Image (cartoon, rainbow, N blue to C red):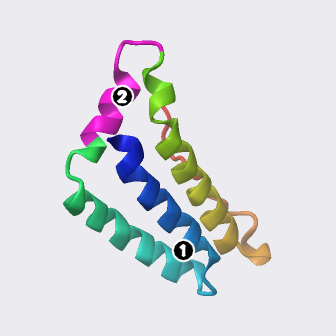
Amino acid sequence: MLARDAATEVANLEYLLAQPIAPTAKLRLHIAGIIRAYHQFPYMNRLIHYLLHESSAEAPTRCRSFCRPLLDFHRRLLAEGVRPASSDHRSGAVLYQP
């Protein structure tokens, strides 16, 4: 179920990165997409967290198809937004990792 519903959202991330618009506009559209996805698939966030923290050994690998592309999108979008003049102030794609 997660793979089916997440596949469309992951494809939308690639489409968004390919658009010839400013990184800030891409970020706004991404946030709007997150809100839309939460409304359309209210169970997805709980399911991802359940799979990540489930006690079985293969549980984390089941949600990589969604989590890795999302982190890759964030890294690439942040790299687009970082200008050479502001290279002393870089943000990470992941601000908190347990």
Circle number at residue 16: 1
Q: Is residue 26 above or below residue 98?
A: below
Image-based side of 16 in relation to 90, left or right: left
User: Residue 24: percent from the left, percent from the top?
Assistant: 53, 79
Q: Quadrant of residue 47?
A: top left
Seen at 51% across and 62% down, the residue is: 11
User: Residue 14: percent from the left, percent from the top?
Assistant: 58, 66
Predominant SS along the magenta part: helix
Seen at 35% across and 52% down, the residue is: 5
Q: Quadrant of residue 90?
A: bottom right
Circle number at residue 51: 2
The 10 Å Cα crowd at callout 2, few under 14, some 14 to 19, many 20 or more, is some
Q: Is residue 59 magenta?
A: no
What amino acid is at disc 2?
Answer: Leu
Q: Residue furthest bottom?
A: 21
Q: Is residue 49 magenta?
A: yes
Label 2 SS: helix
Tell me which segment is drawn in magenta.
46-57
Mark 2–mark 1 CB contact (< 8 Å): no
Image-based side of 25 in relation to 5, left or right: right
Which quarter of the image is occupied by the N terminus? top left
Circle number at residue 68: none
Seen at 56% across and 72% down, the residue is: 15
